[in-house]
Image (cartoon, rainbow, N blue to C red):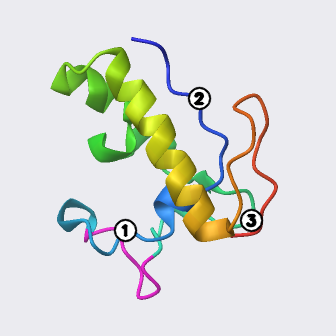
Amino acid sequence: MSKFQCTNCGACCLNISMVPEMQDFVLPSGRCKNLDKDNKTCMIYDNRPILCRVDDLGNYLRLGSSWTALMHVTCNTLHEKVYGVPQEPLDQKCQHES
């Protein structure tokens, strides 16, 4: 399975209120309490939940390369919903404000 390339847009962390498994992490705004909003990174990255570990979750579910492709489509969809524009190329970091 190819490794998921994250652009650090933070879109996946901005509305977790609808995910039952993430309720311990959600703020009243719906954002994850562990998202550093200044640099859009996870403050508990090394200890984040399995739902936030894209590659580990794909391996656990045994979905292979189709999982990585699905996650890129999902990520782009979230980015467009949050920021109103398509995601940056995978070799660039997101420059949008969260």
Which residue lies at the image location 41% right of the left edge and 88% below the top edge? 28
SS at mark 2? loop
Q: Determine the CA span between mark 1 and mark 3.
A: 18 Å
Q: Which residues are magenta?
A: 23-30
Looking at the rendered structure, the kind of residue marked 2 is: Gln
Residue 25 magenta: yes
Instruction: Name the quadrant containing residue 32.
Output: bottom left
Identity of the residue drawn at 66% across and 57% down: 40
- Where residue 60 sits: x, y (%)? 20, 24
Q: Residue furthest bottom?
A: 28
Left/right placement of residue 47 relative to residue 87 reads: left
Can see residue 76?
yes
Q: In the rendering, at what x and y percent does residue 69 appear?
A: 44, 28
Q: Which residue is mark 3?
A: 38
Q: Would you say the magenta stretch is mainly helix, strand or loop?
A: loop
Label whose residue precedes the other's in the sequence (1 or 2): 2
Q: Is residue 41 left or right of residue 49?
A: right
Label 1 close to label 3 by CB (< 8 Å): no
Sequence-wise first label, 3 or 2: 2
Q: Amino acid at mark 3?
A: Asp
Q: Residue 5 in the image: state x and y as whole percent.
A: 59, 29
- Measured as percent of width and height from the top left, residue 3 is found at 49, 18
